Amino acid sequence: MGKRMSHAKWEEYIKKFESYNGSITVKDFCIENDICKTQFYYHRKRLQKEESNDRKDIVFHAIPLAIQDEQKETAKLSKEVKITVGNVTVIIPSDEVNLISKIIKELSISC
């Protein structure tokens, strides 16, 4: 034990451990791979921190839910639902109520 490894090598070990999906303990994994348990925890925490910092770059885009009068009239006649975010437009047939509700739930969760 006590060998010195690069951050990339530790990342490989952390991913390997996670691939076991809880079928092995950290202690057993460290013994099996001849690595220090405290170093394993240190590098796992470091990688988690890096990942959470990467997620801070995510930008929220508000989608107005209030419909103006002209839009209400158009919506009554429309047979599809259009969701536009930035340059992307998603068109869903209005009879796909389940799909529309799933998308709204996903949008609510990501907020």
Image (cartoon, helix red, strand yellow):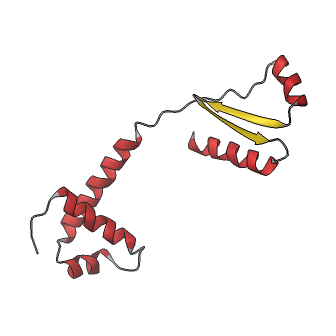
Q: Position of residue 24 (x, y in %)?
A: 36, 79
Pick whichever, 42 or 106, lies toward us: 106
Q: Is residue 98 left or right of residue 45?
A: right
Q: Is residue 9 left or right of residue 51?
A: left
Pick whichever, 55 or 45, lies toward us: 55
Total residue callouts: 0
Residue 77: quarter of image: top right
At 33% from the left and 71% from the top, the residue drawn is 17
Q: Position of residue 59 (x, y in %)?
A: 48, 33
> Image quadrant for the N terminus?
bottom left
In the image, residue 11 sits, relative to residue 105, either above or below, namely below
At 37% from the left and 46% from the top, the residue drawn is 52
In the image, residue 68 sits, relative to residue 53, either above or below, namely above
Q: Is residue 66 left or right of residue 31?
A: right
> Image quadrant for the C terminus?
top right
Whether residue 42 can be seen here: no
Pick whichever, 81 or 56, lies toward us: 81
In the image, residue 89 sits, relative to residue 51, either above or below, namely above
Q: Position of residue 11 (x, y in %)?
A: 26, 60
At 20% from the left and 63% from the top, the residue drawn is 9
Q: Position of residue 27 (x, y in %)?
A: 27, 77
At 35% from the left and 49% from the top, the residue drawn is 51
Residue 94: quarter of image: top right
Whether residue 3 can be seen here: yes
Residue 82: quarter of image: top right
In the image, residue 49 sits, relative to residue 88, either above or below, namely below
